[in-house]
Amino acid sequence: MENYAETIKEFVENHAAGLTVVLVAGAGVLALRRWLAGGVCRSKARLEGKTVVITGANTGIGKETALDMAKRGARVILACRDMTRARIAADEIRQMSGNGNVVVKKLDLASLQSVRDFAKDIQENEERLDILINNAGVMMCPKWKTEDGFEMQFGVNHLGHFLLTNCLLEKLKKSAPSRIVIVSSLAHEKGQIHFDDINLDKDYDRIKSYRQSKLANVLFCRELATRLQGTGVTTYCLHPGVIRTELGRHLFPTLALWKRILAMPFMMLIKSPWEGAQTTIYCAVDESLENVSGLYYSDCSPKKVAPQALDDAAAKRLWDLSASMVGLA
Ligand SMILES: NC(=O)c1ccc[n+]([C@@H]2O[C@H](COP(=O)([O-])OP(=O)(O)OC[C@H]3O[C@@H](n4cnc5c(N)ncnc54)[C@H](OP(=O)(O)O)[C@@H]3O)[C@@H](O)[C@H]2O)c1
Ligand SMILES: *[C@@H]1O[C@H](CO)[C@@H](O)[C@H](O)[C@H]1NC(C)=O
């Protein structure tokens, strides 16, 4: 035993420099990994007897969020536009969670009619709605229009969800305390609401459009919190991190090959969908947030928004414009 200790001591003395390097490098790798991992939702909250709606839940962050809600025992409604993909996702979620109460309902956010039909179904057929997660999104697509003629990214990411949320408010209020979680993005920071050309008809730019839509998410969350004060319905918006999903589907095919090759090392830094879902889950269930509303989160903690996302007059103006665009009185 004494010999063994002696040997170790000798080894450490002889290899001090090398060992230091190994320790520092190890600590560095661990720190990098921790930093990459970002926040994790530690809440053990159970959701038996509660109903959760998640838009765009057939893939990416939404699917991972749905799986977590199912594991917590909720009735989970996957609100998706492609029923084939949605059913496959629902099967997988039921199997992985052991929760049979996972259903799919048709929702195409690029159609106001589809949004109204979906909301009517929930209103008539669901007993309650405890958590609404506005997750679906489209990023940097070509200059496309929704069924109602709105620019696609603003139409899906903001307007569709704006109408959906308003149509579900009654149910949410009846089920209070309840929560509305809006998946925004860091991209809001460079965003601007182009009130004079909201559909970017004059000068369409796919990144400008995405940023506008994600800023609209934050402003909507803020204005909604004000309007819902005292109702027991609270709102949250967030940046999920940079996550490996299908979100780049319209962007990557248009990039030159050398750009795609250059981007490869950075792919290592991109987080998994499980990591990407953590802040959404945190906003949806964490007990510490029960009396908080209207704020923005990243890595499972509150984060400052860009100055233009604190503009209450713009939030109000965006609300009025959105209401008139979707035909809400
Ligand atoms: N990934 C990131 O790094 C990142 C970063 C910041 C913010 N976000 C935000 O995170 C959210 C989720 O994105 P993701 O990364 O998980 O992307 P994703 O894998 O592309 O998933 C997007 C989901 O939205 C659905 N969707 C798109 N258009 C729709 C429509 N018209 N009606 C209904 N559903 C529609 C998609 O359905 P289909 O499968 O049928 O197309 C899909 O289920 C988005 O709001 C995005 O802006 C992501
Ligand atoms: C939220 O408010 C209620 C009522 O005032 C209080 O009982 C509860 O402890 C608060 N929760 C948190 C996490 O602060």
Image (cartoon, grey):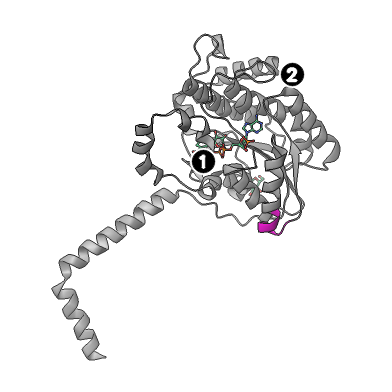
| Residue 220 visible, this orientation | yes
Residue highlighted by disc 1: 240
Left or right, residue 188 beside residue 315: left
- SS type, badge 1: loop
* Three-letter amino acid code of the residue under disc 1: Pro
Disc 1 residue lies near ligand 1 with CB under 8 A: yes
For label 2, the SS is loop
| Closer-to-camera residue (288/277) | 277
- Quarter occupied by the C terminus: top right
Do callouts 1 and 2 mark residues in contact (Cβ within 8 Å)? no
Q: Amino acid at mark 2?
A: Leu
> Which of 153 and 323 lies nearest the eye of the viewer?
153
First to last magenta residue range? 94-99
Q: Residue at label 2?
A: 328
Q: Residue 202: horizontal and vertical position, in percent?
A: 52, 8
Number of disc labels: 2
